[in-house]
Image (tube, grey):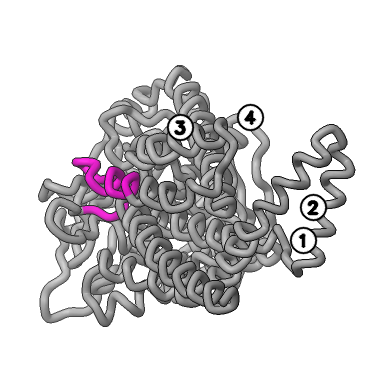
Amino acid sequence: MSSQRNFFIFAFLFVSFLLWQAWQNQLILNNQNNKKNDSSSYLINKNKKKNYIFIKNDVMNLMINMYGGDIEEASLLAYKEKLYTSKPFKLLETTSNFIYQAQSGLSGKDGIDHLDNNERPLYFSKKRIFELSYDDDTISVPITYIGKNGIVYIKRFILKSGEYDVKVEYDIYNSTNKKLELNMFGQLKQTMHVPKTRNAYSGNFVLQTFRGAAYSSINEKYKKYKFDTIAKNENLHVITQNGWVAMLQQYFSTAWIPNSFYKNTLYTSYLEDGTVSIGYKSSSINILAHSKKTIGSTVWIGPEIQNKMALVAPNLDLTVDYGWLWFLSQPLFNLLSFLYKIIGNWGFSIIFITFIMRAITYPLTKAQYISVSKMRILQPKINILKERFKNDKKRLSQEVMLLYQKEKINPLSGFLPVLIQMPIFLALYYMLMSSIELRHAPFILWIKDLSSEDPYYILPILMGFTMFFIHKMSSDNISDPLQQKIMNFMPVIFTVFFLWFPSGLVLYYIVSNIVTIIQQRFILSNLDKKNKKENK
């Protein structure tokens, strides 16, 4: 059918665009890998006074360097590094060739943290290991630093059971006779270069997602900021009453959410050691003489669970980046989640959502096949016109259009269902690539992860067979030998392309093709019966 052919061509162009985009992303990644990156000097300076404490609740384990009180490692206990391992996923990490940290401190006139010259306070703690007990909902871990003139700074990390947001608070006891002026800051620091051993960013050349920074302000709900932009010293400088800064990757993110009571400056910076940072700095905070003040902020370290992130900060759930089709991906995900609650299997939920979407578009599909059927009936008349006006292309086009008008046929009506299906296809593609709920989600038998490719390529091959069957059903409407050859190769080409697509998306496409075959047979069979009755 001409409409099916149009769909294949349109989809072919789309997949070609995805491959081109993935190739561009890979070039950028390779360029980053080739940049000189030596973070050892930074680590050597910090190793002078290396001392750690460990904090654990039921969902994550944090490692905090007492020199500065930065979170240098964070392991997410509910998520595995790889599908077939028991090792938890490590989101924050500090090694000789890769740094990803959540830093925080007090800067300004009377501050105790100066990142520019690596001067940080050395805190102390009575214990090294803190773990949330089964009887408690919250764990609060204080570390202490006594500054000049006897000023006491207590930095406190507060974790709740089952939550990925960590409150970082400062209790400041000013025992002096003068007022203190300082700023609180929080920043996320990460090495641009990703070592090959870093599994968090592994993936095939098709499944490339955004890795970089983002922020939210009073004027911008959500805006991405590329690492390359920061490396060019095109730095962010936004003053806002509220908002947040974040670093994103597929499925996981970290974000600092400052106290909205103060005006905060959102910024980015690039260091010579090959690291980039995005952070915030509060406006000046005054602590009167002989008084105590508590200030703080929140850092999110974990999976991009939309409903939980929305509760932590406005618009933080937008870090689940569904691209320009978010208005389709979001309701599709909500529907998929609803089906999952009933069925309990993400794969079968995808199958059911396919049935639902095809049922919704059935009136358009029926109109498409009716149009195709009428076009097929008109084909002999069109062939006569082609023969009569074979030397006058302009007159031929006019006569064909007059014939369409006389028979009340819109030649573009067969393409409308394709225009509707392709955005749904794209929305599902971005949803499957961005929703943490589908990471390592099993289906049946050999499909253990619907967000990654089929390890044995069975689903793409089945998809190729369904495309081939659809082509054979509609091949009698293609008279051009060149088009016939192209259509013969289409199932093979698409099978190769889909080898690296998420198995959940391939599953959707298989089911959609099967529904197409059933609907096509049913509608065309009824139309043939109707035409035979009318001819009698």
Upstream in sequence: badge 4 or badge 3? 3
Query: Mark 2 belongs to which amino acid?
Result: Val
Reply above or below: 132 against 265. below
Task: Please say if the residues under marks 4 and 2 sit with CB atoms less than 8 Å apart.
Answer: no
CA–CA distance between discs 3 and 2? 59 Å
Reading the image, the residue beneath label 1 is 404
Outermost residue on the front side: it is 536
Q: Where is residue 243 drawn, in percent x and y?
A: 59, 64
Q: Are marks 3 and 2 in contact (CB under 8 Å)?
A: no
Q: Is residue 320 magenta?
A: no
- In this rendering, is residue 526 above or below 10? below
Q: Of marks 3 and 1, which one's residue comes earlier in the chain?
A: 3
Can residue 118 be seen? yes
Give the residues in magenta: 449-465
In the picture, the disc for residue 232 is 4
State the separation of the CA atoms marked 3 and 1: 59 Å
